[in-house]
């Protein structure tokens, strides 16, 4: 049942992949509440991804990492003051579901909504919510996000709607060659989530298309250069800002990557993709006929992720190539 809602706050502070998988809700909020003013609270570093979104009225930023590092009471009180000055919202939805995000939500106002104690990784967060929703913690991450928002706002989002979704971000396409273009994301937050560079080079050779190696920091750039040196099909992708990254990924025919933020952008932008999983599971992506995955044989406990699980190295190149060629058809 729809509610009388004019102003909505979304709290999703980090990380890139989680913000990408959460931002899909904006189009469904707009369909059901076309006149509502939607505002997003995020970490400063991710703001460029959201600031020009046509379905967002405003993006408010905080810098919790800087606060933690500086331990400055002045900056802390400044942040608290900013959050309290945002005005009254009809509902404040904490999609992140952590203690820190629930506190941020409660500082904004009293009309908070989040996961209940059995749905959250940090059950104490429930004490900062006025209302809660229940969904299994081991449910698909995208389904968790959309259920929390739709339940809080009184409407439904189903699989059929997700399969027909619009692109999450509006960007201009990158100018690439007419040959098939494949983006390969080699980075990840942990070493055990990364597919070996030796196998990436082999993968590029077997695909035989324009394989752009997407990199983030200097270490990834070194690995990308090594791959380009050891494969005739590998091309070093240019240095990209966050917004340029979305544009670049939105322009390729296929993306192959580890379980990391840039890889999830492909699904958000309706681009074919193959996600490689080792110590994590396909729960972290929304599978469709053109968004596939390859998982190693290791068993994963999502409540206690083993960062020493390097089983992703065992994934065979031929298994990725087979899926890639099917998608490129």
Image (cartoon, rainbow, N blue to C red):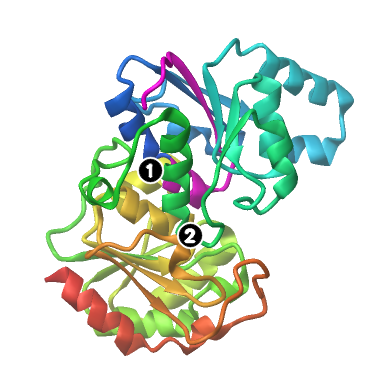
Q: Viewer-nearest of labels 2 and 1?
A: 2
Q: Say above or below: 60 vs 210.
A: above
At a point 32% along the width and 54% down the height, the residue shown is: 267
Residue 38: horizontal and vertical position, in percent? 44, 22
Q: Is residue 10 left or right of residue 143?
A: right
Tally the numbered discs: 2
Give the SS element for disc 2. Answer: loop
Q: Which residue, given by chain and number where applicable, does mark 2 sit on? A: 139
Residue 178 drawn in magenta: no
Magenta stretch, residue numbers = 1-22
Q: Which residue, given by chain and number where applicable, does mark 1 sit on? A: 244
At a point 41% along the width and 67% down the height, the residue shown is: 257
Q: Say above or below: 163 vs 66.
A: below
Q: Tag 2: Cα neighbours inside 10 Å, few (<14), some, or many (≥20)?
A: few
Question: Which quarter of the rendering shows the C terminus?
Answer: bottom left
- Quadrant for residue 29, please give it: top left
- Residue 209 visible in the displayed image: yes
What whole-number distance in Å separates the C-alpha atoms at marks 2 and 1?
31 Å
In this view, the residue farthest toward the front is: 1
Residue 322 versus residue 197: which sits nearer the camera?
Answer: 322
- Residue 239 visible in the displayed image: no
Give the SS element for disc 1. Answer: helix
Q: Which numbered disc flags the more N-terminal residue, 2 or 1?
A: 2
At a point 32% along the width and 40% down the height, the residue shown is: 168
Question: Which quarter of the rendering shows the N terminus?
Answer: top left
């Amino acid at each position: 049942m729809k509610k009388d809602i004019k102003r909505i706050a979304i709290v999703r502070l980090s990380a890139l992949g989680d913000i990408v998988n959460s931002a899909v809700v904006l189009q469904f909020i707009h369909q059901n509440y076309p006149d509502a003013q939607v505002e997003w609270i995020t970490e400063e570093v991710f703001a460029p991804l959201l600031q020009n979104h046509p379905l967002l009225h405003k993006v408010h930023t905080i810098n919790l990492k800087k606060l933690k590092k500086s331990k400055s009471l002045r900056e802390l009180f400044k942040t608290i003051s900013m959050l309290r000055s945002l005005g009254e919202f009809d509902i404040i939805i904490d999609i992140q579901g952590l203690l820190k995000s629930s506190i941020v939500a409660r500082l904004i106002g009293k009309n908070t909504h989040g996961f209940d104690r059995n749905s959250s990784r940090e059950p104490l967060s429930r004490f900062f919510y006025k209302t809660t929703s229940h969904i299994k913690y081991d449910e698909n991450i995208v389904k968790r996000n959309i259920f929390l928002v739709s339940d809080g706002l009184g409407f439904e989002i189903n699989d059929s709607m997700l399969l027909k979704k619009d692109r999450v971000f509006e960007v201009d396409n990158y100018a690439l060659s007419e040959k098939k273009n494949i983006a390969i994301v080699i980075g990840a937050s942990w070493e055990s989530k990364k597919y070996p560079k030796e196998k990436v080079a082999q993968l590029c050779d077997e695909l035989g298309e324009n394989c752009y190696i997407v990199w983030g920091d200097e270490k990834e750039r070194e690995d990308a250069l090594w791959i380009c040196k050891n494969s005739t099909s590998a091309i070093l992708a240019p240095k990209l800002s966050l917004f340029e990254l979305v544009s670049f990924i939105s322009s390729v025919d296929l993306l192959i990557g580890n379980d990391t933020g840039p890889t999830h952008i492909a699904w958000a932008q309706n681009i074919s993709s193959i996600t490689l999983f080792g110590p994590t599971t396909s729960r972290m992506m929304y599978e469709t006929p053109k968004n596939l995955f390859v998982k190693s044989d290791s068993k994963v406990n999502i409540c206690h992720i083993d960062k020493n699980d390097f089983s992703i190295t065992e994934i065979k190149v031929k298994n990725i190539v087979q899926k890639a060629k099917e998608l490129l058809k």
